[in-house]
Image (spheres, helix red, strand yellow):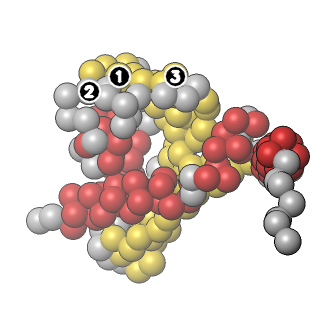
């Protein structure tokens, strides 16, 4: 007995319905994800908070170990404001790895913390903050915590389904903290 012929139009319709259902599920998943995000890494450095704070609160010092500036040594970096502390800032424009934007110190407590506002224009427009916390562990060691906090719009939440933000930013933070550790512990 011969097999019944397959109605290709019914198969195509079913495939389209399944794909549309999957697309709707992914969009719904993205819409229900939290908008707020935070990525954090820490390192213990054999240096005092008094030694480390200027290396974070001065944009020129920050950029000696900043992993993003290191991704494009030819980037156009222009400093503005005071040399360190609140208002110390820089604008940057570089390759696609770092894009274009600005970073400015918005809060600083000597030997304890520094907060920076990060405004990106390219590749994605957004505003986030870097939070650096310096916690003395003993007379010769300091725990440095680097956090990035912000909120995602819908497209960023959709992208975050496929790209692990914690892993990608975390690698950069780990590299930066290692750079800072190397500089701070150098004789």
Q: Position of residue 88 (x, y in %)?
A: 42, 29
* Image side of residue 116 versus residue 62, left or right: right
**N-term-proximal mark, 1 vs 2:** 2
Residue 44: x and y in percent read 39, 73
Looking at the rendered image, the quarter that the C terminus falls into is bottom left
Q: Residue at x 66, y 39 (%)?
A: 156
In the rendered image, the vertical position of residue 37 relative to residue 126, given as above or below: below
156 sits left or right of 148 in the view? right
Q: Is residue 118 left or right of residue 29?
A: left
Tag 1–tag 3 contact (CB < 8 Å): no
Task: Say above or below: 106 vs 26.
Answer: above
Near-viewer residue (176 or 32):
32
The crowding category of the residue bearing disc 1, from other C-alpha atoms within 10 Å (few below 14, some 14 to 19, many at least 20), is many
Q: Answer few, some or many: residues within 10 Å of disc 3's Cα (few below 14, many 20 plus, some between 14 and 19).
A: some
For label 1, the residue is 93
Taking the image as shown, residue 147 lies to the left or right of residue 42, namely: right
In this figure, which residue is indicated by the disc labeled 2?
Answer: 75
Disc 2 on helix, strand or loop? loop
Q: CA distance from mark 2 to mark 3?
A: 15 Å
Residue 37 position within the rendered picture, expressed as x and y whole percent measured from the top left: 68, 51
Q: Quadrant of the N terminus?
A: bottom right
Q: Are marks 1 and 2 in contact (CB under 8 Å)?
A: yes
Q: Residue at x 41, y 80 (%)?
A: 138
Q: Is residue 89 above or below residue 45?
A: above
Task: Determine which of the numbered discs, if any, sits on residue 121 in the image.
Answer: 3
Relative to 136, is 87 above or below? above
Disc 1 from disc 2: Cα separation: 6 Å
């Amino acid at each position: 007995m011969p097999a019944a012929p397959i109605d290709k139009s019914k198969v195509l319709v079913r495939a389209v319905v399944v794909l549309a259902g999957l697309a709707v599920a992914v969009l719904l998943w993205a819409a229900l994800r939290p908008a707020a995000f935070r990525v954090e890494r820490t390192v213990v450095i054999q240096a005092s908070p008094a030694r480390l704070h200027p290396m974070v609160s001065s944009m020129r010092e920050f950029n000696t170990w900043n992993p993003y500036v290191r991704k494009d040594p030819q980037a156009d970096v222009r400093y503005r404001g005071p040399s360190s502390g609140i208002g110390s800032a820089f604008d940057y424009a570089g390759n696609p790895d770092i894009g274009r934007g600005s970073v400015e110190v918005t809060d600083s407590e000597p030997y304890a913390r520094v907060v920076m506002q990060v405004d990106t224009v390219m590749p994605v427009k957004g505003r986030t903050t870097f939070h650096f916390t310096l916690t003395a562990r003993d007379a010769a060691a300091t725990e440095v915590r680097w956090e990035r906090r912000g909120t995602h719009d819908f497209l960023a939440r959709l992208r975050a389904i496929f790209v692990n933000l914690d892993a990608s930013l975390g690698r950069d933070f780990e590299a930066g903290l290692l750079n800072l550790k190397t500089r701070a512990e150098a004789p």
